[in-house]
Image (spheres, coloured by chain):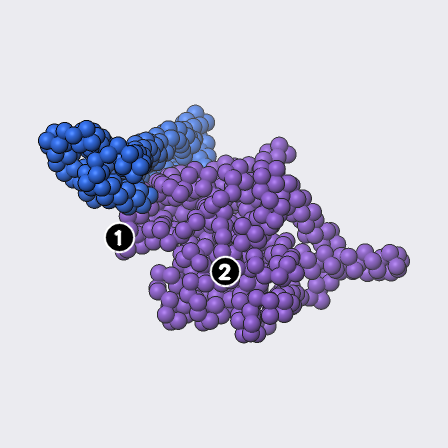
Amino acid sequence: MRLQVAVFYNGFALALTGLFMLVSAGVGVVYHDGSAGLLTVSGLLIAGIGYFPMIFIPRRTDVRLRESIFVVAFGWLTCTFAGAIPFYLYGPPFSFVNSIFESISGFTTTGASILATVEDLPKGLLFWRACTEWLGGIGIVSFALAVMPRMGQVSRPLFQQEYTGLVVPPANVRATDILRGLFAVYLGLTLTQTVLLAVTGMPLYDAATTALATLPTGGFSVRNASLAYYNSVAVDVITMVFMFLGGMNFVYLHVLLTQPRKARQGLEVAALYYGLILAVVALVVFLIRGSVYTNWGDALRFGSFQVISVATTTGFGTADSSVWPIPAQIAIVMILLIGACNGSTGGGIKHDRILLFFKLLHYRFRQMVHPSALASIRVDGRYVDLDAVERTVFYIAPYLATLGLATLILSCIGMNAVDSFTGTAACLANAGPGMGSLGTMENYSAIPTAAKVILSFVMLFGRLEMFALVLPFTPGFWRK
Amino acid sequence: MVLSGANMSLRTKLLLSFLIPSVMWLAVGVWTSARMRNLGSTVEGMLADNERSIRYAVEMVQALERMDSAILLRINGDSAVYAAIMDSASVAYRKSLALAAANITVPGERELLDTLQQLSGRYFFHLQEVVGTPTLSNYNLHLYPTFVATRRAISDLRTMNTEAMYSVAGQIADRARRAALPGDLLMLAAIVFTVAFTVLVQVYVVKPIRRLQNSVHLWWKSGKYEAAQIETKDELQELSEDLMRVRDTIRGKES
């Protein structure tokens, strides 16, 4: 393990984080809301601390696997803590724990907030809050790699710690090119959404912050009532489309946009993603029509928005799903657990794993019935190594174990069963709102401090898919 | 490329090593100073407002008690003393009440003052009744209960503002702690920077110089020159390349 490698790349990630704070300070200056000072000081501190070691340490492109895991884990921890500084400096309602919670929630694109009233905060600080989601969405280390020139072979191992899935970058294409492509898609879609939202009549600041929180499937809004504030069908439809795109595998999306003929790899996962969302939308719309909304139009509008928001683990709200019929709430929680696709900005177990899980189940059943038969698992017409399948599916076990354990701890702290379970599920899937008192129109301000600490870890576990975060803390990781 | 220091000259590297912390110190210093100054004036204002409300409450209680004594003198038949005390006390009371109503600083104070104004109105109404029919039973029936209720409301106003002063003190402590955070971070950063600077200079400046020195020593002793491994592309790399050229020139002359 060469520590200078970790220090160099984390330094760059921190410097970028600081740079975004300075951009947010610019927003504070424009709106003259008093946030420019604290954002400038935080930005200069973070950028300075990050850039300082880069003055001396030469860039290395031969990053090893263990180093890449450490860079990602260390980078996420340092950036989330650094991101909390402007919140803490602002003062109440941001205590130390609240600041860390809000920052982790932003960087992990969870969108769970401790703010009871968002609109009281200065615009510069809210812009920074939206930036944390945008940075976290693409993966802070990957983002650093995308903008760093001449990265060569280093990109692939680092990038693969933040992006996993059945759709991997083609071997003949440099990971740096894929990363830059992803970055271009990410930036392009964010700008497109900003323009489209502004065209609907949404103020430019609201449009930009909403777009910064949509594609990363974050869900931080600058309005207390989330997107329900705008009460606009056009805003709902545009946001739904971009949330949906944010939930797709970005490598697949990039290949689809640049080489559509080669976009066959990933079709099965994409089909499952579309199919499952459509099925749950249909079910929820059917359940809420009559009991909550009197006409099909409203049921379709609010039902589909809520399902897409939860399925992509975004967490925006246009209606309070906590008051919907219980079967609709259960369907929403189930799709929340599955989450988005691998390689997307969303969280959850992911559709890739669900697909492989059912394929593995089918394979095992066939083996029981026909023990001598030669069977295999195929995805998109290609054979997938059984070992790789089991490795991928294995993630479901620690995921559910974390869900169970954190729910138990939260209920011991004094939270009720619905809040404990749905709060943990929403944070683990990086979705944000749960049900009950943590529903779409509620927030995490009233939960105990200890619960905020637990859920902060849960959010990081969910975003880094556990292994990257846990491995550097095991003794075996440091053995030569 | 400015992004990575690998291609920078030693001069730039050393300059940046001092420039970056200096900019950070300057920014933190300016911000903390501005914040502290702002905190001071805010605190001063908040405490002064609370202190004024407390003073008005004390004056109201004093005036109310004087009015109460005056009306008891009136019941006893001492009309001249009653008139003198009542005139000055009622003016003082109304003045303090008006000032308190114009100095709202604490959440809930507006509602409390509305109640106090209603009670005061009722008190003056019953006061006139007792002045018209100055009997002890009339006093006990209406005026005294209103007097007690009004005094309680004034006492609540005083408690509210006293508590607010303590709360302000708590807020000051919290704000001061937050304002000092960048300074604390900078102190920590100063230690980290010092250690990091020492280590980085040792690894990326001193060690390469030693390697070059060893190569030259070896050349001098054995006549063999092996290029020192220099990772950075700065003056040390150039020196290493120059030494190679010198070696090649000497070899060329010898052969």
x, y percentage for residue A335? 63, 59
| Residue A166 visible from this viewpoint | no
Which corner quadrant holds the C terminus of chain A?
top right
x, y percentage for residue A74? 51, 40
What residue is drawn where x is 27% and y is 37%? B138
- The quadrant where residue B180 appears: top left
Return the residue nearer the eye: A170 or A219: A219
x, y percentage for residue A462? 58, 48
Which corner quadrant holds the N terminus of chain A?
top right
Q: Disc 1 marks which amino acid?
A: His
Classify residue A396 as left or right of residue B135.
right
Return the residue nearer the eye: B103 or B22: B103
Q: Disc 2 marks which amino acid?
A: Gly
- Which mark, residue A176? none
Gap between marks 1 and 2 measured at Cα: 29 Å
Q: Determine which residue is flagged by label 2.
A: A317
Classify residue A475 as left or right of residue B44.
right
What residue is drawn where x is 53% and y is 67%? A302
Return the disc, 1 or 2, that comes first in the chain's sequence.
1
- The quadrant where residue B223 appears: top left
| Residue A235 visible from this viewpoint | yes
Q: Chain of mark 1?
A: A
Colour in which chain B is drawn = blue
x, y percentage for residue B222? 45, 27
- Which mark, residue A32? 1
What residue is drawn where x is 43% and y is 28%? B214
